[in-house]
């Protein structure tokens, strides 16, 4: 009787295993034959973004937020799907940055400028990983970079090429940051601009080590001369650049920066606005011009 029970248990296990195997095989066949599973977002990518919209939407709109912050913002995505925009066929996501995945990297001790550059490179790689994931699925990918996110976005273009994504919108960035500003940031000193042109830098480094290290992340991008780094790219017509002429945080684009963008066929939108108002007052026009995204 005991042996019969073991035989029955074994038979049940075999049957269940066979059913499961056949079921998985059929599921795999359905995925491969119909592509029904192709555009569902993997958990690995979900861990790098905050998103809303249909997972299989043909257009992916990625936001690279300013800061640098330790917290991934949800406001931009929530606002986009709040009822004011035409969102049919669009998935929008905010993409994490290195310090969001591991905040401890900026805690404890002062980091070097080279280490800050390494962390910035990691943030670019995270963004590229997300872009490539969706591009490999055949989707259209738009990238919006704002403030610190503007620098991540233009660094992505330098490292991965202008064709990494389909279109780019950069708001409140700089191509060639003033030397005294990025050098001050590298020393942990806050800096800014009077009327968008005249630089001012604090005499002493910030008292908080995390703040000093955050400023070094900004310096790591600010030291780059993007008019030189982007120069090998013949055409930037899929890039729209937005700036405020009295931006107190990053400064106004210089005549040389504007001339460079014009020479590469980039679109430019500007206004007499500070850092915050540049985004608030020009973003609707910029989204329409750059990505064809309209309000209702």
Image (cartoon, grey):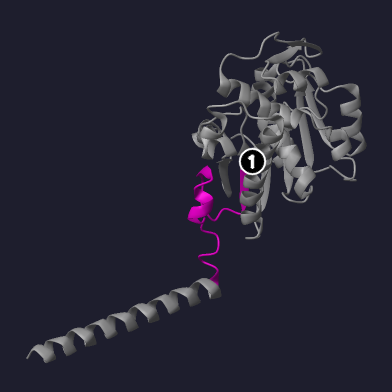
Q: Residue at x 72, y 14 (%)?
A: 192
**Front in this rendered view, residue 116 or 17:** 116
Q: Residue at x 68, y 30 (%)?
A: 112
Q: Position of residue 90 (x, y in %)?
A: 58, 47
Q: Which residues are magenta?
A: 34-61
**Front in this rendered view, residue 147 or 84:** 147
Q: Confirm whether the magenta stretch covers residue 10.
A: no
Q: Confirm whether the magenta stretch covers residue 40.
A: yes
Quadrant location of the C terminus in the rendered image? top right
Q: Position of residue 279 (x, y in %)?
A: 67, 24
Toward the front, the furthest residue is: 109
Neighbour tally class for label 1: few under 14, some 14-19, many 20 plus, Cα within 10 Å: many
* Viewer can see residue 168: yes
Q: Relative to 160, is 5 above or below?
A: below
Q: Position of residue 254 (x, y in %)?
A: 86, 22
Image quarter of residue 218: top right
Q: Relative to 13, is 67 above or below?
A: above
Image quarter of residue 212: top right
Q: Relative to 274, is 267 above or below?
A: below
* Viewer can see residue 72: no
Question: Viewed as shown, does residue 28 lie left or right of 160?
Answer: left
Image quarter of residue 216: top right
**Front in this rendered view, residue 272 or 157:** 157
Q: Position of residue 272 (x, y in %)?
A: 77, 15
**Front in this rendered view, residue 212 or 144:** 212
Question: Viewed as shown, does residue 279 lie left or right of 78?
Answer: right
Question: Viewed as shown, does residue 170 lie left or right of 30?
Answer: right
Q: Say what secondary structure mark 1 lies in.
A: helix
Residue that mark 1 sits on: 123
User: For the image shown, how many numbered marks are present on the structure?
Assistant: 1
Q: Residue at x 52, y 38 (%)?
A: 102
């Amino acid at each position: 009787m005991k042996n019969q029970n073991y035989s029955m248990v074994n038979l049940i296990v075999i049957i269940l295993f066979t059913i499961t195997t056949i079921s998985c095989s059929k599921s795999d066949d359905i995925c491969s034959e119909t592509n029904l599973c192709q555009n569902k977002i993997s958990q690995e990518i979900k861990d790098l973004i905050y998103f809303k919209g249909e997972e299989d939407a043909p257009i992916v709109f990625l936001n690279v937020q300013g800061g640098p912050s330790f917290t991934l913002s949800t406001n931009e995505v929530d606002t986009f799907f709040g009822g004011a925009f035409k969102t049919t066929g669009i998935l929008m996501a905010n993409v994490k940055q290195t310090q969001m995945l591991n905040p401890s990297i900026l805690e404890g001790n002062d980091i070097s400028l080279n280490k800050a550059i390494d962390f910035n490179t990691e943030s670019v790689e995270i963004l590229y990983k997300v872009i490539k994931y969706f591009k490999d699925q055949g989707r259209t990918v738009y990238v919006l970079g704002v403030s610190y996110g503007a620098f991540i976005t233009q660094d992505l273009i330098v490292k991965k090429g202008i064709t990494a994504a389909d279109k780019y919108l950069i708001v409140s960035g700089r191509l060639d940051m003033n030397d005294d500003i990025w050098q001050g940031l590298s020393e942990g000193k806050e800096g800014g601009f009077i009327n968008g042109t005249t630089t001012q830098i604090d005499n002493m480094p910030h008292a908080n080590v995390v703040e000093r290290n955050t400023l070094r992340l900004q310096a790591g991008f600010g030291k780059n001369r993007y008019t030189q780094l982007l120069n090998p790219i013949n055409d930037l017509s899929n890039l729209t650049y937005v700036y405020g002429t009295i931006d107190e945080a990053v400064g106004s684009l210089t005549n040389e920066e504007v001339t460079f963008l014009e020479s590469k066929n980039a679109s430019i939108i500007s206004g007499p606005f500070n850092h915050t108002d540049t985004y608030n007052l020009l973003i609707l026009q910029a989204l329409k011009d750059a990505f064809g995204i309209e309000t209702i």
